[in-house]
Amino acid sequence: DAGVIQSPRHEVTEMGQEVTLRCKPISGHNSLFWYRQTMMRGLELLIYFNNNVPIDDSGMPEDRFSAKMPNASFSTLKIQPSEPRDSAVYFCASNIDPNSYEQYFGPGTRLTVT
Amino acid sequence: KQEVTQIPAALSVPEGENLVLNCSFTDSAIYNLQWFRQDPGKGLTSLLLIQSSQREQTSGRLNASLDKSSGRSTLYIAASQPGDSATYLCAVDQGGSEKLVFGKGTKLTVNP
C-alpha cells in the first residue's frame, strides 16, 4: 500500500486566497484525521471522520476552515480566506480499527501564507 | 482536558549510549498511548502502541512502558545510533475516543 497520500506537498499563497489541501487515506481504513503542526502549539487535531462522517470538529480554529470527506478514499481541508497565521504543516492520518487507535500519517502539506 | 508533556525538549547523546525519553499526561483515563518518530520535513511514523491493559511494548532496540496510575510513559532506546536522531512524540487518546493528544516532542541527536 502507498500509505496516506497528501497533496500538494508545499503550498505558498497570498493572504486572502482560498487554499485546498487533499488527502487519500490508506485503503480500507475507516477513520481519517486532519492535524496542524506549528512550533508554538505542536501537533493539534482539527477534525476527524469515521466512515466519511465528521465526528468531532472542535479543533477547527474558525469558520474559515472547512473539511469534507465525500467518499472513503478522499478528503479535503479548505481554508477560505487564508491568513498568515494559518502557515503550518497540515497532516492527514488514517486508522483501520477504532479500538486500536493506531494512526498512520501522511507526509504533510507545508502551507505558507504571505 | 488532557495535556501531554515531554521532557526534555532536546537531548544530545554519544553513539552507543542507552537513553530514556519521558512522557507524562494529566488524565489517566486513557485507552492507549502511542510513541511516534518524526524526521525533519517528514510525517510521523508509529513506533509503539501500548494499550491501557498493557505495561510495556518492545520493538527491536525500543521499549516503551506505561504507568497509567502515575500518568507516565517512558521510551527506552538501547545502544543508540546516529540514525536514531529524530523528534520523538508521544500521544494519548482523549477520554477513550479516537482523538489523540500529542506532546511537543523530544528532539534527539545521537552523535557519532
Image: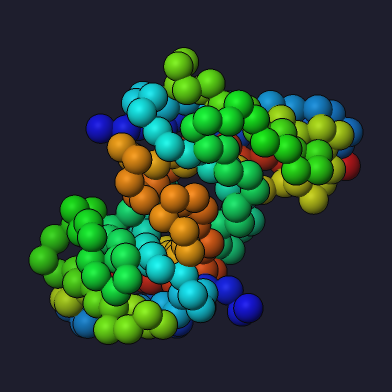
Q: Is residue B95 above or below residue A54?
A: above
Task: Check the image and report above or below for B103 versus A113.
Answer: above
**Where residue A99 sits: x, y (%)?**
44, 50
Examine the rendered structure and indicate whether residue B27 appears above or below residue B51: above
| Closest to the observer, A94 or B4 | A94
Front residue of B87/B112: it is B87
Q: Give coordinates of residue A25: x percent, y percent.
A: 46, 75
Instruction: Name the image quarter holding residue B43.
Output: bottom right
Q: How many marks?
A: 0
Q: Locate residue A51: give its quadrant.
A: bottom left
Name the residue at the left extreme.
A63
Q: Is residue B11 visible?
A: no
Q: Position of residue A97 (x, y in %)?
A: 47, 59
Residue A103 visible from this viewpoint: yes
Viewer-proximal residue among A38 and B70: B70
Instruction: Determine the residue positioned at 56% across, 26% down.
Output: B66
Q: Is residue B94 left or right of residue A57?
A: right
Looking at the image, which residue is at 86% across and 34% down?
A: B79
Q: Quadrant of the C terminus of chain A?
A: bottom left
Q: Residue at x 33, y 46 (%)?
A: B97
Residue furthest toward the top? B70
Would residue B21 be found to the left or right of residue B63 on screen?
left
**Residue A78 location, quadrant:** bottom left
Q: In the depicted view, which residue is nearer to us: A38 or B2?
A: B2
Answer above or below: position of A73 versus B3: below
Q: Quadrant of the N terminus of chain A?
A: bottom right
Q: Kindly identify the residue that appears in the image at 61 percent across and 56 percent down.
A: B45
